């Protein structure tokens, strides 16, 4: 009798564990876009609308003007948006990785969409959480990124015939970096003879 009760309890516990496992495995994993540019969480993202020379030549009567830009999640939900009061020439803008209320956005994939008088152009960014140890050093020299791995991109192809969004790190000089991982930023060059 005791053996039967223990067997029934064992089957019940095993069944609950199996049910729990099946529920966690049925959650759909986040799909990775085919191309993106990765940035650290909290890092400002600079972008610009590049209009190739060929596009200007083939559309001589059509002047492309920018009416605004927005950032959306993979599901298409608008996170941040800027609408210009009047159309402007293609230029450079900065997204500070915040939503419309000024709150930092979570790590993940986002699309930056530039709205123009001729259509919309987009590119995808991947925001990666920084570990405690790895504080990226974005000084004026890109080779000071030592000690920080795991930030990889899959850049999107660009067209020479139509406008595209160019994504890049905003130029900054930050010093010092996390001393335990990267070391201080900057290079000091001494010229001439110093005092003894």
Image: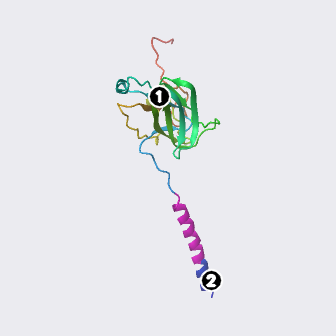
**Residue 175 horizontal/vertical position (percent):** 55, 27
Residue 5, disc? 2
Q: Residue at x 49, y 12 (%)?
A: 194
Q: Earlier in the sequence, mark 1 or mark 2?
A: 2
Q: How many marks?
A: 2
Q: Is residue 5 visible?
A: yes
- Which residue bears the numbered disc 1? 48
Q: Quadrant of residue 23?
A: bottom right
Q: Quadrant of residue 102?
A: top right
Q: Considering the numbered disc 1 on the image, is that residue within a helix, a strand or a loop?
A: strand
Quick one: 87 or 93, which is closer to the camera?
A: 87
**Residue 64 horizontal/vertical position (percent):** 45, 26
Q: Main secondary structure of the magenta part?
A: helix
Q: Which residues are magenta?
A: 10-27
Instruction: Check the picture and name the quadrant holding the N terminus.
Output: bottom right
- In the image: residue 7, left or right of residue 56: right
Quick one: 168 or 57, which is closer to the camera?
A: 57
Residue 91, disc? none
Q: CA distance from mark 1 to mark 2?
A: 70 Å
Q: Is residue 130 visible?
A: no
The question of residue 181 being in magenta is answered with no
């Amino acid at each position: 009798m005791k053996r039967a009760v223990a067997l029934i309890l064992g089957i019940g516990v095993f069944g609950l564990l199996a049910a729990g496992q099946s529920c966690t495995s049925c959650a759909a994993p986040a799909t990775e876009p085919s191309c993106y540019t990765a940035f650290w969480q909290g890092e400002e993202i600079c972008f610009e609308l590049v209009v190739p020379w060929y596009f200007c030549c083939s559309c001589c009567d059509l002047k492309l003007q920018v009416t605004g830009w927005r950032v959306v999640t993979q599901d298409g939900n608008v996170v941040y948006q800027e609408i210009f009061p009047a159309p402007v020439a293609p230029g450079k803008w900065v997204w500070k990785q915040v939503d419309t209320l000024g709150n930092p956005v979570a790590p993940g994939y986002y699309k930056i969409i530039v709205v123009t008088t001729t259509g919309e152009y987009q590119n995808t960014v991947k925001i990666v959480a920084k570990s405690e140890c790895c504080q990226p050093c974005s000084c004026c020299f890109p080779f000071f990124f030592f000690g920080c791995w795991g930030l990889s991109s899959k850049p999107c192809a660009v067209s020479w015939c139509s406008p595209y969004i160019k994504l890049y790190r905003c130029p900054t000089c930050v010093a010092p970096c996390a001393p335990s991982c990267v070391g201080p930023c900057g290079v000091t060059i001494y010229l001439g003879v110093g005092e003894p």
